Amino acid sequence: DTGVSQDPRHKITKRGQNVTFRCDPISEHNRLYWYRQTLGQGPEFLTYFQNEAQLEKSRLLSDRFSAERPKGSFSTLEIQRTEQGDSAMYLCASSRDSLAGTQYFGPGTRLLVL
Amino acid sequence: GENVEQHPSTLSVQEGDSAVIKCTYSDSASNYFPWYKQELGKRPQLIIDIRSNVGEKKDQRIAVTLNKTAKHFSLHITETQPEDSAVYFCAASNNGNQFYFGTGTSLTVIP
């Protein structure tokens, strides 16, 4: 499967714990995006990388959230001191520079904070 | 920042009829407008997109129209089939730097 992959697919954690999610984009895609989606809502943009550079970050993104893409390939999203309001689906997407905007989504990581 | 509004939130049509979903955006710098279909428990899938230098684009039963002056774009599905039932999201982007999504339209096609 050469599509976008995410790991884990599901995560249950207790409030206050830290969690880390991984995204592997389509191999030739330079751009990588993270979104959060709650039930009944559209994906909410969190942050975006072009290669290893983090170019955009939502103003809504708490300081507890951090993302990295150290070698311009896979990316990680960490949430520190999780809160119940962090429960959501976390989606990753990737795209090529040459087709800026045409992005493909991964299956998501569903987070439940108890 | 950009604000994307989507209507209606739910839509039911008889099989074979057409369905139309409308979105408006606020930022004139937005130049790329994709539409995604999301089935329950699955990832959003791109179904069609349009760039600001084009007014209309069609792919078989699906078409999208864009009015840059009025800042709105619409998805048209003709000859609907039960498998078209899903949630549809519109989005707006400025060169792929950020994407702003609408709140979704739950489409039900009644056999």
Image (tube, helix red, strand yellow):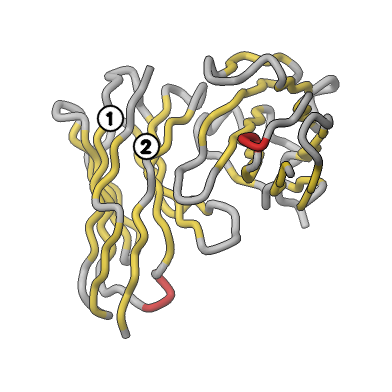
Chain identity of mark 2: B
Q: Split into 4 quadrants, where in the image is the C terminus of chain B?
A: bottom left
Say which amino acid is labelled 2: Phe
Which residue is pictured at 73% across the width and 39% down the height?
Answer: A25
On residue B25, which mark appears? 1
**As displayed, is residue B110 above or below residue A38?**
below
Which residue is pictured at 30% across the width and 30% down the height?
Answer: B52
On residue A52, which mark appears? none
Say which amino acid is labelled 1: Tyr
Chain identity of mark 1: B
Number of labelled discs?
Answer: 2
Disc 1 + disc 2, Cβ < 8 Å = yes
**As displayed, is residue B1 above or below residue B89?**
above
Residue B84: give x, y in percent of width and height.
Answer: 39, 70
Question: N-terminal of the two: label 1 or label 2?
Answer: 1
Residue B43: give x, y in percent of width and height.
Answer: 59, 54
Mark 2 lies on residue:
B33
**Side of A15 where A45 appears, left or right:** left
**Mark 1 neighbour density, 10 Å: few (under 14) some (14–19) many (20 or more):** many
